[in-house]
Image (spheres, helix red, strand yellow):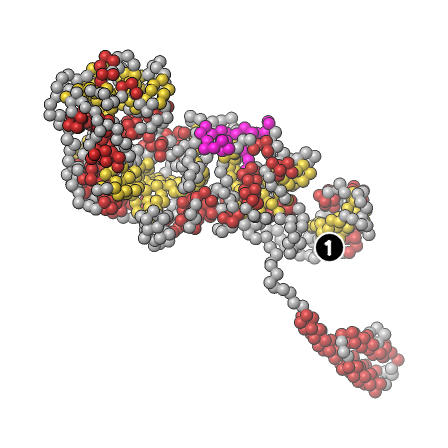
C-alpha cells in the first residue's frame, strides 16, 4: 500500500519528519518497505498484513498515526449538500454474497480530464488517471479503502441493477477488453437484461463511463470476501477492488464512501446527486469482548497502566466500558480482525511498543529430552562421510520424471510412481524425487564442467515413494558419488574407485557399530544404472539395504560425464539406524601371542577372494583370528586363466601359547581344503 | 700355561684395537670366543689340567674371556653408533613433497548452521521433532488458523499436489502434529525443508526453516523476547541488537517480526540491510489461542510462544554469502569453504 505523507497529514496534524514517521509506522506493525521522494511529497510503501484491510487506505493509516501519537483524527468530508430525485432501482438476488449495496445516481455530469492535483496524487499511488469520474472513484478507494464503481446509467437496460450469480452466463467482457470465463457461482452485477460487471473485481465494457456519458450510477457495496477471492482466483484477475473486498471492507463505511465520491463528482464533474438506495437487509451488529487487566498483563508479562490501555483503544476507534476487573470492548466495524481477547491484548502491546517490553527467561519444569535416534544416526553418517573426504550436497527435492529413462529405470519400478506437483515452477521440476541419484549426477556434471577433477559428494535427504495413502512415504536415503581422477598423482592410487567407496562404507558401518553386513554380487545388476559386472547389493542383517557399484556406461553417456564414477546408496537410514549397536561390549585383550603364516595360492580367475576367504575360515578350528589378503597377482609365471592370491593368516588361542607343530597341521589343512574345494595350487 | 693365556689375551686386545669395522669385530669374536675359538679350545681342555693348578687356570681363563668380551662389546657399540651416525647423515627426505591423505570433506553450510542452532536449543532442554515435507493442507494451513479462501494464504506461495495436499510452506505444521500427540509442558524445535513456489535472485523454491515453540503454564511475551535474545546472541554474538516489530501470522497473537542489527555493517547501513541497519531474521509470536484450542489445549490454562527462522538467511549473514542461489548448486568450490 502506497501512502502519501501530505495526504496523511490532511487527516492527522502530526509534526514528524518523514523518516521518523516511517519508523513510527514500522514499529506499530506497518512496515515501511520503501520511501520515495516525489515532487512536493513523500510516498511510503507500506506492507499491510492481511488482517488489516482497514489500513489499505489513507484514513486507516492516519488512524494508526493518530493513535500512536495521541493526536486527533479528522473525518472525511462526505456531506451531500443537496439531494435531488429518488434513488436507483436495486435488487439483490444473492443476499448471501452481497450483504449491502448502496447507490446513488448523478445526472448531468460532464466527463473530462481530472484536475492536476488529482492526477498527481493518483499517479503517486500507482493509479493511472483516465477521466474525472473514474479518477474520483479511485481516489475515494485509496482514501477510504472502499472500492466504488461508476456505471453509465443510460447503458443500463431498465435503468436498474440486479445482483445475482452468473448461473448459465459463462462469458463476460471486462473493461480491460478481455473475455473472461465465468462459473455459475461468480457474482455478477446485472441490469434488466445482461451482466454489467463482475462484482467486486471489474466492471464491464458494455456499461463503462465514457466521454459521452451524461448520467451515472455509483455503486458502493459489501460483497462476500470468500466469493470475491474465489472469483478473482478463478478468472485470474487481481484488482485494487478485489484485493480489498477479499480481505473485507467496512460494512458501515460503505455509505460514507459513496457519499464522499458523490460529493466529489458533483464538485468536479458537475451533476445532480440523487437520494440514496441502500439495500442493507441485515445491519452490522457490533461485537462485545471482555478483557481482564490481569490477562493483559499475564500474556505480555508486565503491568501496563489501565489508563494507557483505555486511551490507546479509544484512539483506535474502540468503545470501552469498565466492568469489574476488566473492560468490555466494542471494536469498530472496520476491525473484523478483532475476534477475541488476545486480539485486544495485541493492540495494547503493539501501541505500547514491543521494544519497551523487557526480556525474561521462562521458569520451567525440567523434562527429559529423549535422544532423536534417526537424527543421531544421520549425524554420525554425515560426520563419517566427511572424515572419508566426502562433502555434503543438498539438492532440490524436485525431479524431472523423464530422467528415469536416462537411469534405465524399468517401467514397473516403484521409483517411476512419482508424486506430481500441480503448479511446478518448471516442467523439469514437476515431480518429487524418488531417488537421490539424478541430482548428484547433475552436481558431478556441473563441477566437472567447472574444472573440478576428483569429486566426492554425498547427500542425506528424503525421497517420496508411493504409499497408497494420502501422503507418500518419506524415506531418508544416503547417496554418495565418487568421481576418481585417474591422472598421474605423486602417490600410488591407481586402483578402481569402487574399492575406495567400499572402504568408505566399511568404515561407516564400523563407526555405526554395524557388523553383520555383506556385499552380494549377482548375475544381473542390482540397480539398472550400475555396471552389471561392477556392482553389488549391500545387505545388513541379511536384508538388502543398499547398493554399491560403478555407474553404467550408458548412464554416464546420458548425463554427459565420463571417468571412473562409483556410487554408494543406502535406501533407508531409519532401517539402518535400527541395526546400529547401542553400546560396544568390551572383549578381554588376548593374553597369549599369535603366530602369523602366509599362504599364496593359484586359483582359476573366476574364484573370488571372498570364496577363498570363506574356504579358509570355514575350516573347523577356533584359533584362526584373522585372514587378510595382501596380494592379488596375474601375469607370468601364473598361467593366463589363473591368478595368485596371497593371504596372511593369524593364529591365536585364547588359553595357551600355540606350538609350531599345532599351527603347521592347521595351516596345511587349510591348503588341502583350498585344493579340494577351489582346485587351488600352492604358489611356489 | 698361564702365560700362554695371558698372551692370548694381550694379542686379542691388540687385534681389537686395530679392528676397523663391525666385520673385524665379528671375526675377532669368532677367532677367540667362537665354538672353535682359541680361548674356547682352552676352556674345553680344562679337564686335562692338574687338580691343584685347575682353579687358578680356570679363573685366569674366565677373566681373559670376560676381558675380551667386554672389549669386543665396547668396540662393537662404538662402530655401531658411528655407522648409524654415518647412515643418518646420508638419509634425507624432501619434506616439501605433499602429504599423502584424503582431505576431509565438508558439511553443507546449511547443515552446519542448522547443527549450531539445534545445539543451542537442545542445551536449553528443547526436543527435536520432525514432520512430513509433503503435508496435508489441514496441518499446513487450516489447523494454523488459515482456513481455505483466507487471504493470509497469499503470504506463502504454495506448491499444490492436490486440493488436500501441499508441499509444506513452513515448519509450523510440526507444531500442530506435536501438540496433537502430547500434553504440555512442551519445548520443541522442528528443523527441516520447506517449499515456496517462488524463484528469483533472492528466493529459492526449497529452503530450510527451524520452528521452535514452547507451551506451558505462564509463558509470557517477555519470555519469547528473552529466549530469542539469548538465541541471537549465541549465534551472532552478544553485541548484536534485536528489534521486535508487530506483525501478523494467523497462528500467533500477538505476532512479531524480529530484526537484528546488520552483522555486515554493524548497523551503519549497507547493501545487505538496504541502508536501514536492520535485517529481518525471525517471525514469532504468542501461539494463537485458537491454535491451542484446535489441538485440544485449554487456552485459559496454557500459553505458549512459537518462532520460525530461515536457515539459509542465517547462514548468509554468518558467512557473508551474498547469493542464496549458491546453496542448492553444490559447487565444490563453494562447499569446501565451510
Which residue lies at the image location 66% right of the left edge and 46% below the top edge? A496
The residue wearing badge 1 is A596
Q: Position of residue A65 (x, y in %)?
A: 20, 40
Which chain does the numbered disc 1 sit on? A
Quadrant for residue A676, please give it.
top right
Which residue lies at the image location 72% right of the left edge and 76% below the top edge? B79
Taking the magenta stretch, the answer to whether it contains residue A508 is no
Region of the chain picked out in magenta, as a range: A411-436
Q: Position of residue A144 (x, y in %)?
A: 21, 31
Q: Where is the N terminus of chain B found, in terms of image quarters? A: bottom right
- Apparent side of residue A600 relative to residue B264 in the rendered image (left or right): right
Which residue lies at the image location 32% right of the left edge and 48% below the top edge? B275
**Relative depth, front residue between A453 and A379:** A453
As drawn, the residue found furthest toward the left would be A81
| Element under disc 1 | strand
Taking the magenta stretch, the answer to whether it contains residue A416 is yes
Work out whether residue A130 can be spotted.
yes
Quadrant for residue A339, please give it.
top left
- Majority SS type along the magenta span: loop
Which residue lies at the image location 19% right of the left edge and 25% below the top edge? A258
Q: Position of residue B93 (x, y in %)?
A: 64, 65
Quadrant for residue A614, please give it.
top right
Amino acid at each position: 500500500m502506497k501512502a502519501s505523507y501530505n495526504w496523511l497529514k490532511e487527516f492527522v496534524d502530526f509534526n514528524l519528519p518523514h523518516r521518523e514517521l516511517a519508523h513510527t509506522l514500522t514499529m506499530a506493525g506497518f512496515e515501511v518497505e520503501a520511501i520515495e521522494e516525489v515532487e512536493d511529497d513523500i510516498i511510503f510503501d507500506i506492507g499491510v498484513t492481511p488482517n488489516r484491510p482497514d489500513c489499505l487506505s489513507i484514513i486507516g493509516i492516519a488512524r494508526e498515526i493518530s493513535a500512536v501519537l495521541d493526536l486527533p483524527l479528522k473525518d472525511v468530508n462526505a456531506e451531500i449538500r443537496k439531494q435531488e430525485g429518488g434513488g436507483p432501482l436495486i435488487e439483490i438476488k444473492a443476499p448471501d454474497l452481497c450483504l449491502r449495496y448502496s447507490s446513488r445516481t448523478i445526472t448531468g455530469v460532464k466527463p473530462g480530464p481530472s484536475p492536476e492535483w488529482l492526477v498527481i496524487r493518483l499517479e503517486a499511488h500507482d493509479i493511472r488517471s483516465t477521466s474525472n469520474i473514474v479518477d474520483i472513484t479511485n481516489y475515494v478507494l485509496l482514501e477510504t479503502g472502499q472500492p466504488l464503481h461508476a456505471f453509465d446509467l443510460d447503458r443500463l437496460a431498465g435503468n436498474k441493477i440486479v445482483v445475482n450469480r452468473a448461473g448459465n452466463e459463462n462469458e463476460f467482457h471486462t473493461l480491460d477488453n478481455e473475455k473472461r470465463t465465468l462459473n455459475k457461482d461468480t457474482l455478477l452485477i446485472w441490469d434488466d437484461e445482461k451482466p454489467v460487471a463482475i462484482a467486486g473485481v471489474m466492471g464491464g465494457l458494455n456499461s463503462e463511463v465514457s466521454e459521452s456519458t451524461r448520467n451515472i450510477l455509483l455503486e458502493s457495496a459489501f460483497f462476500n470476501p470468500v466469493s470475491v477471492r474465489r472469483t478473482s482466483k478463478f478468472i485470474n484477475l487481481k484488482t485494487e477492488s478485489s484485493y480489498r473486498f477479499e480481505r473485507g471492507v467496512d460494512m458501515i463505511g460503505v455509505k460514507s464512501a459513496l457519499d464522499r465520491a458523490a460529493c466529489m463528482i458533483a464538485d468536479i464533474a458537475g451533476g445532480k446527486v440523487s437520494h440514496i438506495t441502500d439495500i442493507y437487509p441485515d445491519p452490522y451488529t457490533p461485537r462485545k469482548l471482555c478483557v481482564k487487566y490481569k490477562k493483559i498483563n499475564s500474556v505480555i508479562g508486565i503491568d501496563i497502566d489501565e489508563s494507557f490501555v483505555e486511551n490507546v483503544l479509544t484512539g483506535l476507534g474502540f468503545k470501552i466500558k469498565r466492568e469489574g476487573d476488566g473492560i468490555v470492548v466494542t471494536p469498530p466495524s472496520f476491525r473484523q480482525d478483532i475476534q477475541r481477547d488476545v486480539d485486544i491484548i495485541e493492540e495494547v502491546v503493539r501501541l505500547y511498543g514491543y521494544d519497551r517490553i523487557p526480556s525474561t527467561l521462562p521458569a520451567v519444569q525440567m523434562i527429559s529430552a529423549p535422544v532423536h535416534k534417526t537424527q543421531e544416526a544421520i549425524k554420525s553418517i554425515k560426520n563419517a562421510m566427511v572424515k572419508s573426504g566426502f562433502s555434503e550436497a543438498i539438492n532440490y527435492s524436485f525431479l524431472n520424471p523423464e530422467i528415469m529413462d536416462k537411469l534405465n529405470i524399468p517401467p514397473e519400478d516403484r521409483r517411476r510412481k512419482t508424486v506430481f506437483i500441480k503448479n511446478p515452477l518448471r516442467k523439469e521440476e514437476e515431480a518429487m524425487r524418488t531417488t537421490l541419484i539424478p541430482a548428484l549426477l547433475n552436481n558431478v556434471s556441473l563441477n566437472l564442467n567447472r574444472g573440478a577433477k576428483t569429486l566426492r559428494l554425498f547427500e542425506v535427504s528424503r525421497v517420496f515413494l508411493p504409499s497408497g495413502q494420502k501422503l507418500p512415504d518419506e524415506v531418508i536415503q544416503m547417496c554418495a558419488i565418487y568421481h576418481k581422477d585417474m591422472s598421474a598423482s605423486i602417490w600410488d592410487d591407481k586402483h578402481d574407485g569402487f574399492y575406495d567407496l567400499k572402504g568408505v562404507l566399511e568404515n561407516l558401518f564400523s563407526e555405526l557399530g554395524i557388523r553383520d553386513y555383506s556385499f552380494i554380487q549377482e548375475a544381473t545388476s542390482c540397480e539398472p544404472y550400475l555396471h552389471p559386472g561392477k556392482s553389488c547389493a549391500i545387505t545388513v542383517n541379511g536384508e538388502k539395504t543398499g547398493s554399491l557399484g560403478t555407474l553404467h556406461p550408458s548412464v554416464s553417456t546420458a548425463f554427459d560425464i565420463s571417468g571412473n564414477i562409483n556410487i554408494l546408496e543406502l535406501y533407508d537410514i531409519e532401517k539402518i539406524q535400527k541395526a546400529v549397536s547401542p553400546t560396544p561390549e568390551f572383549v578381554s585383550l588376548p593374553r597369549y601371542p599369535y603366530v602369523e603364516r602366509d599362504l599364496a595360492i593359484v586359483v582359476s580367475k573366476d574364484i573370488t577372494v571372498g570364496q577363498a576367504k570363506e574356504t579358509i575360515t570355514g575350516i573347523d578350528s577356533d584359533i584362526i583370528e584373522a585372514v587378510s589378503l595382501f596380494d592379488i597377482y596375474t601375469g607370468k609365471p601364473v598361467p593366463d586363466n589363473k591368478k595368485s592370491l596371497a593371504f596372511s593368516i593369524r593364529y591365536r588361542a585364547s588359553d595357551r601359547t600355540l606350538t609350531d607343530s599345532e599351527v603347521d597341521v592347521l595351516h596345511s589343512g587349510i591348503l588341502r581344503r583350498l585344493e579340494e574345494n577351489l582346485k587351488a595350487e600352492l604358489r611356489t | 700355561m698361564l702365560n700362554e693365556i695371558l698372551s692370548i689375551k694381550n694379542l686379542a686386545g691388540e687385534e681389537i684395537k686395530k679392528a676397523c669395522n663391525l666385520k673385524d669385530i665379528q671375526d675377532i669374536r669368532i677367532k677367540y670366543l667362537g665354538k672353535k675359538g682359541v680361548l674356547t679350545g682352552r676352556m674345553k681342555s680344562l679337564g686335562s689340567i692338574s687338580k691343584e693348578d685347575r682353579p687358578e687356570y680356570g679363573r685366569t681363563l674366565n677373566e681373559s674371556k670376560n676381558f675380551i668380551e667386554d672389549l669386543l662389546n665396547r668396540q662393537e657399540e662404538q662402530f655401531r653408533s658411528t655407522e648409524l651416525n654415518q647412515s643418518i647423515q646420508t638419509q634425507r627426505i624432501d619434506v616439501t613433497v605433499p602429504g599423502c591423505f584424503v582431505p576431509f570433506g565438508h558439511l553443507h553450510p546449511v547443515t552446519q548452521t542448522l547443527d549450531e542452532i539445534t545445539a543451542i536449543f537442545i542445551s536449553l532442554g528443547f526436543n527435536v521433532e520432525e514432520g512430513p515435507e509433503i503435508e496435508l493442507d489441514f496441518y499446513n494451513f487450516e489447523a494454523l488458523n488459515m482456513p481455505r479462501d483466507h487471504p493470509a494464504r497469499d503470504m506463502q506461495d504454495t506448491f499444490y499436489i492436490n486440493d488436500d495436499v501441499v508441499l509444506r510452506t513452513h515448519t509450523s505444521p510440526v507444531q500442530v502434529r506435536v501438540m496433537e500427540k502430547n500434553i504440555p509442558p512442551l519445548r520443541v524445535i522442528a528443523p527441516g525443508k520447506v517449499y515456496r513456489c517462488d524463484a528469483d535472485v533472492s528466493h529459492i523454491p526449497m529452503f530450510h526453516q527451524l520452528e521452535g515453540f514452547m507451551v506451558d503454564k505462564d509463558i509470557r511475551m517477555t519470555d519469547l523476547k528473552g529466549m530469542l535474545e539469548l538465541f541471537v546472541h549465541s549465534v551472532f554474538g552478544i553485541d548484536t541488537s534485536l528489534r521486535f516489530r508487530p506483525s501478523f501470522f494467523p497462528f500467533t497473537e500477538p505476532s512479531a517480526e524480529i530484526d537484528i542489527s546488520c552483522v555486515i555493517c554493524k548497523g551503519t547501513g549497507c547493501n545487505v540491510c538496504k541502508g536501514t541497519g536492520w535485517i529481518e531474521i525471525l517471525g514469532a509470536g504468542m501461539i494463537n489461542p485458537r491454535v491451542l484450542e484446535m489441538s485440544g489445549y485449554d487456552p485459559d490454562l496454557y500459553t505458549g510462544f512459537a518462532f520460525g527462522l530461515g536457515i539459509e538467511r542465517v547462514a548468509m549473514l554468518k558467512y557473508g554469502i551474498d547469493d542464496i542461489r549458491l546453496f542448492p548448486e553444490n559447487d565444490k568450490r563453494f562447499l569446501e569453504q565451510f
